[in-house]
């Protein structure tokens, strides 16, 4: 019986994670603009970005895994605008949101 209780309590939390994640934008790399510099890798707070080999350039390109939380830091810090945030509906997040996020990160509300 204790096993059944653990399974029942585990299911709602996993559903909440899926629901919460689906409401946030996630990072997508624009391969034509990514230089493989690694700035996004260094700034990602949850380490979900890596540099992988690519035919596009000799340093590789960034790759975002499924653990992206949509914090926008990689998109804000990329000097070549090689990272864009994609909303759950497939639309691109407005760049005004990046500026707003940047002001919050720097302490300007």
Image (tube, rainbow, N blue to C red):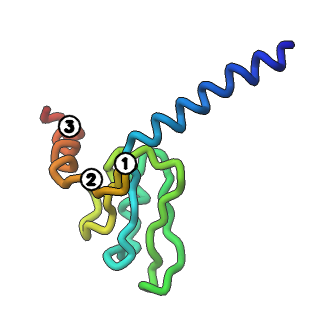
Callout 3: 10 Å neighbours few (<14), some, many (20+)?
Answer: few
Q: Residue at x 24, y 39 (%)?
A: 105
- Quick one: SS at disc 1? loop
Quadrant of the frame with the C terminus: top left
Which of the pair 101/28 is nearer the observer? 28
Cα gap from disc 1 to disc 2, whole angstroms = 7 Å
- Pointer 2: what residue? 93
x, y percentage for residue 99? 16, 48
Mark 3 touches mark 1? (CB < 8 Å): no
Compared to residue 17, the image places residue 27 above or below, namely below
Q: Of callouts 1 and 2, which one flags the residue occurring earlier in the amino acid sequence?
A: 1
Compared to residue 6, the image places residue 87 above or below, namely below
Cα gap from disc 3 to disc 1, whole angstroms = 17 Å
- Pointer 3: what residue? 104
Mark 3 touches mark 2? (CB < 8 Å): no
Q: Residue at x 83, y 14 (%)?
A: 2
Cα gap from disc 3 to disc 2, whole angstroms = 17 Å
Mark 1 touches mark 2? (CB < 8 Å): yes
Compared to residue 109, the image places residue 51 above or below, namely below
Q: Residue at x 53, y 78 (%)?
A: 53
Callout 1: 10 Å neighbours few (<14), some, many (20+)?
Answer: many
């Amino acid at each position: 019986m204790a096993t059944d209780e653990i399974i029942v309590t585990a299911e709602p939390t996993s559903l909440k994670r899926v629901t919460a994640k689906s409401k946030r934008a996630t990072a997508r790399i624009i391969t034509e603009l990514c230089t493989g510099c690694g700035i996004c890798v260094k700034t990602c707070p949850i380490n979900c970005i890596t540099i992988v080999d690519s035919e596009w350039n000799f340093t590789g390109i960034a790759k975002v895994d499924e653990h992206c939380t949509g914090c926008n830091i990689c998109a804000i810090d990329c000097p070549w605008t090689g990272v864009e945030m994609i909303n759950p509906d497939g639309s691109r997040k407005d760049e005004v949101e990046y500026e707003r996020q940047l002001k919050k990160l720097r302490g300007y509300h």
